[in-house]
Image (cartoon, rainbow, N blue to C red):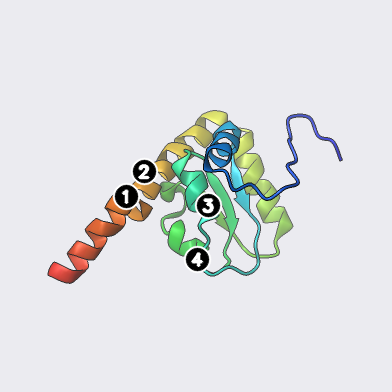
Amino acid sequence: MQLSGVMWINEYVRDRTAIQRYLSAADVYTLPSRHEGFPVAPIEAMACSLPVVATDAPGVPDILADGEASGGLVVPRGDIVALSLALGRILDNPIWGRELGTRARCRALEYFSLEGIGQQLRNFLFI
């Protein structure tokens, strides 16, 4: 289905510049997974200042531990209504969406960047 303002890319994109360009052009990132280990894609989106709407699949609540304060919304797996409402909340309020995106970027840098992980390891090992 062709939707206005929606671009469908039917390929596996490996080029980091292209991925960053696609993510930076988006308004919101969604991960409607039922099963995950520790998903990296939402962290990549967060690093590009995107708010995230994701299901509570394993690993996701760890990434968005503080919900909205972490830059995203977590909804129950398999609940399409909750997923749709969460996406609608962000898309209907672009100013709030950008604020969530700012929080998401801060969370990604503080907890998941090389520097952030290095600091966490130092704190763990030397305290």
Considering depth in this image, is 22 or 30 the residue closer to the camera? 22
Q: Quadrant of the C terminus?
A: bottom left
Q: Provide the residue designation for mark 1.
A: 110
Amino acid type indicated by mark 2 = Cys
In contact (CB < 8 Å): disc 2 and disc 4: no
Separation of residues labelled 2 and 4 (CA atoms): 19 Å
Numbered label tally: 4
Q: Provide the residue designation for mark 2.
A: 106
Mark closer to the chain start, 4 or 1: 4
Residue at 46 percent across and 53 percent down: it is: 67
Separation of residues labelled 3 and 4 (CA atoms): 10 Å
Residue 121 occupies quadrant: bottom left
Q: Residues within 10 Å of mark 2 (few under 14, many from 20)?
A: some
Considering depth in this image, is 123 or 89 the residue closer to the camera? 123
In contact (CB < 8 Å): disc 1 and disc 2: yes
Amino acid type indicated by mark 3 = Pro
Residue 90 occupies quadrant: top right
Residue 27 occupies quadrant: top right
Give coordinates of residue 119: x percent, y percent: 23, 57
Separation of residues labelled 4 and 1 (CA atoms): 17 Å
71 on left or right of 82: left
Q: Provide the residue designation for mark 3.
A: 42
Give coordinates of residue 5: x percent, y percent: 73, 30
Separation of residues labelled 1 and 3 (CA atoms): 15 Å
Mark closer to the chain start, 3 or 2: 3
Q: Which mark is residue 38?
A: 4
Residue at 51 percent across and 62 percent down: it is: 60
Give coordinates of residue 64: x percent, y percent: 46, 56
